[in-house]
Amino acid sequence: MTLTVATWNINSVRLRINLVTRLLRQHQPDVLCLQETKTIDDFFPRKRFQELGYVHQAIRGQKGYHGVAILSRLPFARTDTREFCGKQDCRHMAVTLTNGIELHNVYVPAGGDIPDPNVNPKFAHKLDFLRELADIFETRTDRATPALLVGDLNVAPLPQDVWSHKQLLNVVSHTPVETELFGAAKAAFDWIDVSREFVPHEEKLYSWWSYRALDWEKSDRGRRLDHIWASPSLRGAAKTHAILKPLRGWKLASDHVPVLARFET
DNA sequence: ATGGTCGGTGTCCGA
């Protein structure tokens, strides 16, 4: 089995379809997981992906906000979507490939600005979402199933996943309550943090740079919000990994860059 | 300590 997977918060798939096709041509992943597609399914540019060989498509979008999609050259045995926190927003899509790998594409709520669930319902939603993410896999008994969980998880868990650990401890995405719940979700299925299998914890590693910087590259105030998790049954299977930082410099860039990994068993 | 920029259901909301 070989599988190359890519995840990218695209921040409007219709606006950036040309960037997506450039990524697919250059890197040719088998499967691409998108978040923040920001379109209803009727307007999703299915044909553009079909033309590039990504004929297997699992799409779940809504008007204006959120939205996830899995575009694949490999066929699906099944597709599934979950409504986290009892909400209808489109934040999860799962497929099982015919090679047996189960793939979850997740878009965790950003959580708003104020890191207090008592005054900020968006932050409360984010914490609930992370708890549910832990619960789903905690209760699963089929630990042998090869599985991947990728997406914009909107948490930078490690001190070196942000430009300043100290200055971001009270900033949503890096608060202790978030990183603890993130850790619990990760531990619930013994998920492997694939990016950190390749890059030591002591090294800075980011996948997102704010639009608000005058010069994103010069200030380099990034965060690692986008993740690829692999189940323990895939330990050692990840052979290559990349976070495509140069794409942040593309014209009309998303504020997130793609994360890629290649698995071989 | 603050403000800064994006995209879309656009003169507001979510990120």
Image (cartoon, coloured by chain):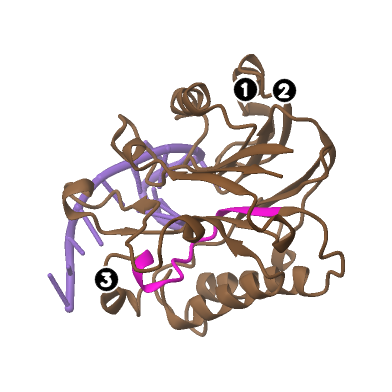
Chain colours: A brown, B purple
Q: Position of residue A199 (x, y in %)?
A: 42, 58
Q: Which disc is residue A55 wearing? A: 2
Q: Residues within 10 Å of mark 2 (few under 14, many from 20)?
A: some
Q: Nearer the viewer, residue A199 or A82?
A: A199
Q: Which disc is residue A141 wearing? A: none
Three-letter code for the amino acid on which mark 2 is drawn: Val
Q: Residues within 10 Å of mark 1 (few under 14, many from 20)?
A: many
Q: Residues within 10 Å of mark 3 (few under 14, many from 20)?
A: some
Three-letter code for the amino acid on which mark 1 is drawn: Phe
Task: Looking at the image, tell me whether mark 1 or mark 2 is earlier in sequence order.
Answer: 1
Secondary structure at badge 1 equals helix
- Residue at 76% across / 56% down in the picture? A82
The number of numbered discs placed on residues in the rendered structure image is 3
Q: Nearer the viewer, residue A51 or A97?
A: A97
Instruction: Report the residue marked by disc 1.
Output: A49
For the magenta stretch, what is the residue range? Answer: A148-161
Q: Which disc is residue A164 wearing? A: 3
